[in-house]
Every structure is written in C-alpha cells, then in structure tokens.
C-alpha cells in the first residue's frame, strides 16, 4: 500500500511541476534514485507516463538517454557511466531538457569551424552574421550611438 501512495505522490509532483512550467516557465527535476521505488515500480511509473515522439542518445563519458513521455513537457533522463552503470535517473519537467541545449562555447566553436571551411557557401563576404548578447537576447552595444 505504501508503494501506491509513493506512486500517487510522484504523479502529483509531476502535475505540480507541469503547472509550474505553464504558470512561471520554471522547470522541475525529480531524481528517481532518491525516491522510495523499486526497479519494478519505476518501470510502472514509466509505463504510466507513456512514450512520446522524441528520444535522444548522447555519448559523452557514458551514455545518456533522453525520452519524451506521452505528456508534453515531461521527459525521462538517464545517465550511465562508461561501464554502463546507471548513475542518475530523473524526470525533467521542462520544454527541453538542459542536456540537449547547445552551450554558448560549443555554438561559438561551431561558428568558428564554419568560417574556417575553405569552400563553404557561407563565407564572410556573402554571410550576414548578427551578433547577439546571450544574456539579453539583443545585439550588443558597440558604442556607435543610435
């Protein structure tokens, strides 16, 4: 009976997380490894949440799998070490899990790689690059006045 209560509590936490995401745009992460669930109960919760349309696998210091559930905004995220041992298992309630978002240094490295390509169709002469200040999402003030 306690397992049923824990499962209902988790589903209520997911509902609260979705409401918070809708109201304030704030993400919620639920660490399943800290919940009082057996592997069977976690599988039951995953079955309750269903399967969505998106699954991504990342290979970096082990395998990470991100799976959308049937509930938009609810994602299952697992991280394994290089030996395949489960390290973290989470439910992320967000528009897109953080691990899938490109980080600014990586994007800058991509831009640098593109501009160094000798035969790229997007050379400095025919490519308009608009700088954006990532903190404000606006072009930076270059001191040129208005």
Image: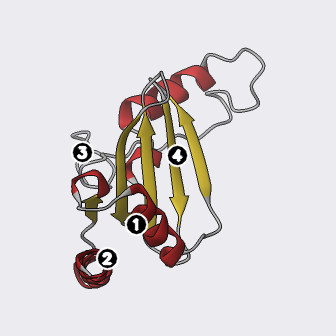
- Disc 1 crowd, CA 10 A, few/some/many (<14, 14-19, 20+): some
- Under tag 1, what secondary structure? helix
- Cα–Cα span, label 2 and label 1: 8 Å
Q: Secondary structure at mark 2?
A: helix
Question: In the picture shown, does residue 18 fall above or below 126?
Answer: below
Q: Is residue 122 found left or right of 33 in the rendered image? A: right
Q: Is 88 situated above or below 11?
A: above
The reply to whether callout 3 and callout 2 are in contact (CB within 8 Å) is no
Q: Residues within 10 Å of mark 3 (few under 14, many from 20)?
A: few
Q: CA distance from mark 4 to mark 2?
A: 23 Å
Say the numbered circle drawn on residue 41. Answer: 1
Q: Residue at x 47, y 70 (%)?
A: 44
Q: Is residue 74 left or right of residue 65?
A: left
The picture places residue 73, in percent across and down from the top left corner, at: 44, 72
- In this image, 47 relative to 89: left or right? right
First along the sequence among labels 1 and 4: 1
- For label 4, the SS is strand
Indicate which label's residue lies in the foreground, 4 or 2.
2
Residue at 62%, 25% (x, y): give it. 114
Answer with mark 4 or mark 3, whichever residue precedes in sequence.
4
* Quadrant assignment for the C terminus: bottom left
Q: Are marks 2 and 1 in contact (CB under 8 Å)?
A: yes
Q: Which residue is mark 3?
A: 141
- CA gap, disc 1 to disc 4? 19 Å
Total residue callouts: 4
| Badge 3 element | loop
Badge 2 is on which residue? 7
> Which is nearer the N-term, disc 3 or disc 2?
2
Of labels 4 and 2, earlier in sequence is 2
């Amino acid at each position: 009976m306690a397992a049923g209560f824990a499962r209902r509590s988790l589903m209520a936490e997911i509902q609260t997380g979705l409401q918070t995401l809708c109201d304030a745009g704030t993400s919620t992460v639920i660490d399943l490894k800290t919940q009082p669930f057996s592997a069977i109960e976690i599988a039951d919760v995953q079955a309750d949440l269903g399967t969505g349309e998106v699954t991504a696998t990342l290979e970096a210091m082990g395998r990470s799998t991100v799976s959308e559930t049937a509930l938009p905004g609810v994602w299952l995220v697992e991280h394994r070490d290089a030996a395949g041992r489960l390290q973290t298992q989470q439910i992320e309630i967000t528009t897109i899990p953080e691990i899938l978002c490109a980080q600014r240094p990586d994007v800058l490295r991509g831009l640098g790689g593109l501009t160094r390509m000798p035969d790229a169709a997007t050379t400095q002469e025919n490519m308009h690059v608009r700088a954006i200040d990532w903190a404000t999402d606006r072009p930076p003030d270059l001191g040129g006045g208005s």
